[in-house]
Amino acid sequence: GAGVSQSPSNKVTEKGKDVELRCDPISGHTALYWYRQSLGQGLEFLIYFQGNSAPDKSGLPSDRFSAERTGGSVSTLTIQRTQQEDSAVYLCASSLPLTSGSSDTQYFGPGTRLTVL
Amino acid sequence: DAKTTQPPSMDCAEGRAANLPCNHSTISGNEYVYWYRQIHSQGPQYIIHGLKNNETNEMASLIITEDRKSSTLILPHATLRDTAVYYCIVRPYAGGTSYGKLTFGQGTILTVHP
């Protein structure tokens, strides 16, 4: 079946511009995650959605970063007034609902490579 | 901060078994051990996970010590396409608002050579 898809695959923008990154999770996956991977850095967690709500936003690096999810499916990560340090690969993952006593494997998309000039 | 320790790099000959170790001495009773890998320029790929019993699937085997403080991922017949960064992650399976996230360390760069 179809996996997690992300768009665009590459985005080049100028410093100060706003960007929107899109994630389409696997059908039926109500949990959705955003991570980012900077050059030479490991993967770091940004935000987690269960349905349309975000119980964990602890990884968002500043208030320039926001994310929303509507209809329990597609999610958009928005970065306002982009800075050069925002350059990274932004990864999305989805999983089945997180329920007590279950282990819910996250499946990742291919990522969006963001370059801020 | 990551709760696992892995060697930074390992080599393996094609066709041989690759055994990747991971220490997780502070693992809690409600935490699983997960393994992912990331091939260059791709998103992380799920491999296998386990709680306390050994596990096997079509990709790999996972051996967890009885005290659960360490584990080994085994790729039984490594191929060149298995060259990747391998991440060992501990993750709680229930409870709390942040238990869903994965915390990645630096992983092990596995290089499979002909």
Image: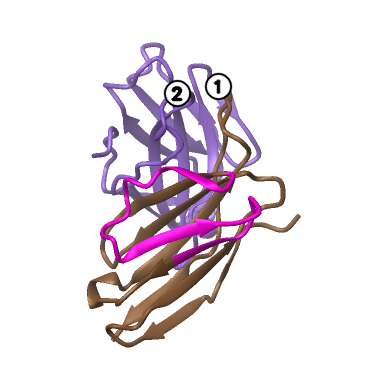
Q: Which residue is mark 1?
A: A100
Quarter of the figure with residue B27: top left
Spot occupied by residue B92 in the image (x, y as percentages of width and height): 43, 26
Decide: few, some or many residues near mark 2? Use Cα within 10 Å; few <14, some 14-19, many ≥20. few
Tags 1 and 2 on a common chain? no
Q: Is label 1 in contact with label 2 (beta carbons under 8 Å)?
A: yes
Asked if residue A54 lies in the magenta stretch, the reply is: yes
Secondary structure under tag 1 reads: loop
Side of B89 where B26 appears, left or right = left
Q: How many marks?
A: 2
What x and y, as percent, mark residue B6? 29, 39
| In this rendering, position of residue B88 left or right of residue A105 | left
The answer to whether residue A82 is above or below residue A4 is below
**Residue B66 is inside the magenta segment:** no
- Where is residue A110? Give x, y as percent: 53, 64
* Residue A67 at least partly seen: yes
- Chain under numbered label 1: A
Q: Residue at x 41, y 32 (%)?
A: B97
Chain corresponding to brown in the figure = A
- Name the amino acid, label 1: Ser
Give me the chain that's purple: B
From the top left corner, tell me how far across and down residue A94 is, in percent: 57, 48
Secondary structure, mark 2, is: loop
Q: Which residue is mark 2?
A: B95
The answer for how far apart the CA atoms under marks 1 and 2 are is 7 Å
Foreground residue, A73 or A105? Answer: A73
Q: Which residues are magenta?
A: A51-77
